[in-house]
């Protein structure tokens, strides 16, 4: 699978099926090796003699001077460590310089990440990726694959810039706070081949003397009071017993620290572990920062950090009123208490053993075979009375045995007065797997707050149960549809989807025919579910015709788990003199135009005729008759419509033409040939234009996906660009901002 945003071709990146995208640069020969990660192939670079050997891409890639670029590769070499560089060239092909990464700290035959980032110097027009190692003899091999070159790959929504998130450029985004020095290092770290957010460089905190040590970010992004933020970073502790921690801090307008939330890592190895924590910005908070450190460290110990992120905390389930901190248990037990019984509560340990939603869960331990009631803190439930609410926990029996687990919702008034608990739903909890346990209840009169309550009955001594991913939300329709007539689409909203499963979405016509609906990766046909809530805009739904939607959910490919169906809905076009011209992959360009005259259709056919001597009639050999062709005459009625139509037609993409039923034209995918734009007479200032669009019928695009921000938000624009002028210098149009399509 191609790396998103890669400027290199798939063959040059993956070394499959050939390595012709690479060439020796210095002291080496190259060949195609085997045993790669993203395919069998890899680039095998063999030294000719002792000394540095280099290989680079054959051609070069267009770049823009002053722009930051990023390159990474996965490398393997049992004899000698590697480094990666970006080679900058001007328009004459002269090398202006090379930005090199640090060299990996040790040689390793396991696949590990190397990376580098740098700003293209003044005068740069092209760049090359270059790979290097320095063996002590000839005949030494280094292997590479999974190579990326392009713009920096950032975590969407991160308040920190790329320079702080990744440490690929330098370590200036950090300062040594207590008993430490800062540097950058490239340890041998193996990341998943498709995990593109992590590079090779890490921030290294070295402890100066025995005792506590810490470092903190210099960058302090702005926060919104009352908003919960999620912070995380990959931590590599020096020893298994290290007390390594991550801390999210908030500061007031004068730069004074006003609060901090710390989470300690419970490592299972001395490798990289992602530690998460969350906290709500206080009422007087203006900025935030991250700190990390070691308690009780020895002199010379090193704590490494990678992929440092602060962003608005996600909802565990769409609409939940339970904050991330109280439902995920990443830093502590989330304020839960034992209301009755012998159970004790703690964050699970070690890292990764008791977590479903993150790396940790709530560990409920019962020394005796008895029943215990545990309860979350109380949370505000807006406009709750009379509404149906749903509570969820995800639970796992980890030791002993649990006969039943009952999930309830406990109701309270505005001053904490007890309004009682719902009857709840009783579950058996077999050992070995995670199970989603839910219950529904209607909030009684006077309800202002609610808590999730779990009654767990242990049937054996020394029983342990893990609970994670706790959520409480108002029950809304799992499947809802809405016609947005003004913009010509139907909005389909899907809730409570099983994340990680697969989904197929059909549009069902009045004749019960099914058509796959388009998503960001093409037609939605057993696509992976990335969120429990999904909003789909169906811009290809027919006009003035009732349709519904049928959804199939698969646990694995081909294994149908459940189905859903929506109610019927109709997309209305009130003015039958108008029709829609739509770009299926770019719905932001869709235009409603006035029709002057529908086409007079032709259907060409390829034929060859032969005259047979002595016969009256010719012999004609025919191909298959082709689709419709004809000229559509339309008007645009304003300069805005005229510009919008030009934007729609500029790409040359296959379009969808939709007219109201009864006008003698079915919905049709078309290609548009050379267009004619004419004035309609009258004054020069007249905005109306007459257009002739030569149409050729086309098949429905199958692989075309709906373009969009793909997770980018305005926060990413604010983080990446210091001023609006920087945005204007980088993007030509607002559509380019949406699609992150930069000049050059």
Image (cartoon, rainbow, N blue to C red):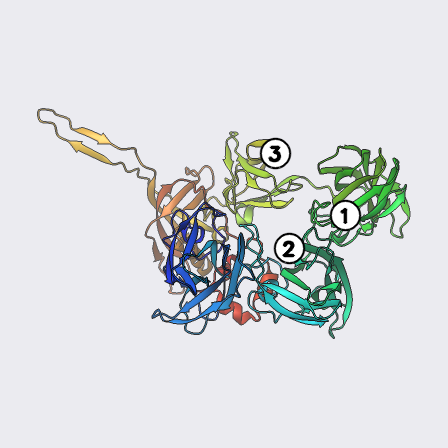
Label 3 sits on residue: 565
Q: Which residue is mark 1?
A: 348
The answer to whether 425 is drawn above or below residue 572 in the figure is above
Return the residue nearer the eye: 651 or 106. 106
At which x and y percent is residue 636? 42, 55
Q: Is residue 423 visible?
A: no
The crowding category of the residue bearing disc 3, from other C-alpha atoms within 10 Å (few below 14, some 14 to 19, many at least 20), is: some
Q: Is residue 36 above or below residue 570?
A: below
- Give the SS element for disc 3: strand
Tell us which disc is closer to us: 2 or 1.
2
Residue shown at the point (53%, 29%) measured from the top left: 512
Q: Residues within 10 Å of mark 1 (few under 14, many from 20)?
A: many
Q: Work out how far the residue at label 1 is from the one at label 3, CA to CA, in angstroms.
A: 40 Å
> Which mark is first along the chain, 3 or 2?
2
Q: Nearer the viewer, mark 1 or mark 3?
A: 1
Mark toward the viewer: 2 or 3: 2
Residue 233, numbered label: none
Q: Which residue is mark 2?
A: 272
Whether residue 353 is visible to the viewer of this picture, yes or no, is yes
Percent across and percent down for residue 699 are: 40, 40
């Amino acid at each position: 699978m191609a790396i998103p945003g890669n400027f290199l071709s798939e063959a040059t990146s993956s070394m499959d099926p050939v390595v012709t995208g690479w060439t020796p640069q210095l002291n080496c020969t190259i060949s195609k090796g085997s045993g790669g990660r993203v395919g069998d192939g890899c680039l095998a670079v063999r030294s000719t003699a002792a000394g540095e050997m280099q290989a680079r891409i054959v051609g070069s890639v267009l770049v823009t001077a002053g722009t930051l670029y990023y390159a990474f590769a996965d490398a393997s070499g049992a004899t000698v460590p590697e480094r990666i560089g970006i080679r900058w060239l001007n328009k004459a092909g002269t090398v202006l310089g090379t930005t090199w990464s640090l060299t990996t700290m040790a040689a390793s035959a396991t696949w590990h990440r190397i990376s580098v980032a740098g700003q293209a110097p003044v005068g740069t027009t092209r760049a090359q990726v270059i790979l290097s190692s320095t063996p002590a003899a000839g005949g030494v091999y280094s292997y590479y694959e999974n190579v990326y070159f392009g713009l920096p790959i950032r975590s969407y929504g991160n308040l920190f810039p790329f320079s702080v998130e990744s440490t690929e450029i330098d370590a200036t985004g950090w300062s040594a706070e207590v008993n430490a020095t800062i540097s950058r290092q490239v340890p041998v770290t193996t990341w998943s081949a498709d995990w593109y957010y992590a590079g090779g460089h890490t921030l290294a905190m070295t402890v100066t003397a025995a005792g506590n040590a810490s470092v903190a970010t210099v960058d302090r992004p702005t926060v919104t009071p009352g908003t919960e933020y999620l912070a995380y970073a990959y931590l590599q502790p020096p020893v298994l017993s290290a007390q390594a921690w991550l801390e999210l801090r908030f500061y007031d307008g004068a730069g004074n620290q006003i609060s901090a939330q710390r989470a300690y890592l419970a490592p299972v190895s001395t490798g990289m572990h992602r530690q998460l924590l969350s906290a709500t910005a206080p009422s007087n908070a203006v900025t935030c920062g991250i700190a990390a450190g070691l308690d009780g460290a020895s002199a010379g110990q090193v704590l490494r950090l990678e992929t440092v992120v602060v962003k608005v905390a996600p909802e565990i389930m769409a609409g939940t009123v339970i904050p991330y901190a109280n439902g995920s248990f990443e830093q502590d037990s989330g304020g839960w208490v034992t209301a009755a019984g012998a159970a004790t509560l703690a964050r699970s340990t070690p890292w990764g053993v008791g977590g479903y939603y993150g790396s940790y869960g709530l560990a409920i331990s019962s020394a005796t075979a008895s029943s215990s009631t545990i309860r979350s803190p109380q949370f505000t439930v807006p406009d709750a009375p009379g509404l149906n609410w749903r509570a969820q926990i995800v639970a796992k029996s980890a030791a002993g045995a649990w006969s039943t687990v009952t999930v309830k919702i406990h109701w309270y008034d505005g001053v904490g007065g007890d309004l009682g608990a719902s009857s709840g739903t009783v579950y058996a909890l077999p050992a070995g797997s995670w199970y989603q346990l839910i219950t529904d209840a209607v909030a009684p009169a006077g309800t202002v707050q609610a808590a999730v309550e779990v009654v767990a009955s242990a049937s054996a001594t020394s029983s342990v149960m893990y609970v994670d991913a706790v959520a409480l939300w108002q029950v809304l329709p799992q499947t809802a549809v809405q016609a947005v007539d003004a913009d010509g689409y139907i909005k389909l909203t899907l809730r409570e989807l099983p994340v990680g499963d697969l989904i197929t979405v059909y549009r069902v016509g009045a004749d019960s025919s099914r058509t796959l609906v388009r998503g960001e990766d093409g037609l939605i046909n057993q696509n992976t579910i990335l969120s429990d809530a999904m909003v789909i805009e169906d811009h290809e739904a027919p006009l003035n015709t009732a349709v519904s939607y049928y959804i199939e959910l698969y646990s694995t490919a081909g294994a149908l788990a459940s189905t859903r169906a929506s109610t019927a809905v109709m997309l209305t076009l009130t003015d039958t003199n108008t029709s829609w011209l739509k770009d299926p992959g770019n719905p932001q360009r869709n235009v409603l135009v006035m029709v002057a005259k529908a086409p007079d259709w032709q259907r060409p056919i390829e034929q060859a005729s032969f005259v047979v001597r002595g016969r009256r009639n010719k012999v004609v050999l025919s191909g298959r008759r082709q689709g419709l062709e004809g000229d559509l005459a339309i008007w645009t009625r304003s300069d805005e419509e005229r510009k919008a139509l030009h934007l729609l037609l500029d790409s040359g993409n296959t379009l969808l033409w939709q007219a109201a039923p009864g006008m003698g034209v079915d919905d049709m995918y078309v290609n548009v040939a050379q267009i004619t734009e004419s004035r309609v007479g009258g004054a020069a200032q007249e905005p109306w234009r007459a257009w002739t669009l030569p149409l050729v019928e086309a098949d429905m695009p199958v692989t075309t996906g709906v373009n969009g921000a793909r997770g980018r938000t305005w926060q990413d624009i604010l983080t990446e660009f210091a001023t609006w002028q920087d945005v204007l210098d980088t993007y030509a149009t607002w559509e380019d901002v949406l699609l992150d399509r930069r000049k050059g």
